[in-house]
Every structure is written in structure tokens, then in C-alpha cells.
Image (cartoon, rainbow, N blue to C red):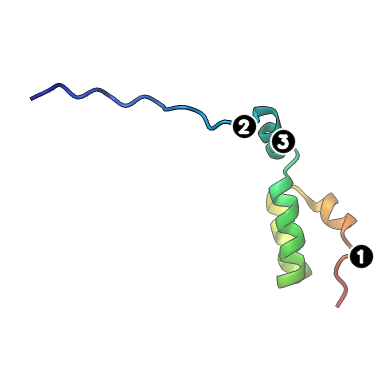
Amino acid sequence: MAEQKKKSGGSKKIGRDVAKGARYRGLHIREKNKVKRVLCSSGAKAAKQYATKHGLLGYLGSLGSLHRN
């Protein structure tokens, strides 16, 4: 029986921009977008809880005019 080789990491996808991904993670874009979605769907209390957990209370304060009930 032939000896099996360990699979390597494979190739990176063409067009993958490392700097763009680092900026996305560094500026917490995903979390900021989610704060907006949580604010609209679940209200201010849930949004404040999520923002506190992810260190985005200042950003949540700047969204005050986005959602008024």
C-alpha cells in the first residue's frame, strides 16, 4: 500500500486582500453593523448589552437618532 502524504495548507484564493481583512477586523466593522441590526430588531436594551460586551458603547451613542420608538 502506498504511503499517504500529509495534506498541506493549500493555496490562497486569488484576490484575497490581506490588508482589507485586517482593516475589517481592526475597525470592528462586523460588530458595528450588528449593533445597528440589534438596535432595530431587539431594541435599545439588547443593543446596549451587545455594545458593552464588544466595547462599542461610544458607537452606540452615536446611533441615537437611528432608532426611536
Residue 10 vs residue 46: left or right?
A: left
Q: CA distance from mark 1 to mark 3?
A: 25 Å
Q: Which residue is mark 1?
A: 65
Disc 1 marks a residue whose amino acid type is Ser
Q: Nearer the viewer, residue 59 or 40?
A: 40
Q: Which residue is mark 2?
A: 15
Assign a secondary structure to mark 3. helix
Disc 3 marks a residue whose amino acid type is Gly
Q: Nearer the viewer, residue 41 or 9?
A: 9
Q: CA distance from mark 2 to mark 1?
A: 38 Å
Tell me which residue sits at (74%, 54%) in the image: 33
Picture quarter with the N terminus: top left
Assign a secondary structure to mark 2. loop
Q: Nearer the viewer, mark 2 or mark 3?
A: 2
Picture coordinates of residue 45, whole percent (x, y): 75, 68
Is disc 2 in contact with disc 1, using a CB cutoff of under 8 Å? no
Picture coordinates of residue 35, whole percent (x, y): 74, 58
Residue 51 vs residue 7: left or right?
A: right
Query: How many dots with numbers?
Result: 3
Q: Which residue is mark 3?
A: 26
Tell me which residue sits at (72%, 71%) in the image: 41
Picture quarter with the C terminus: bottom right
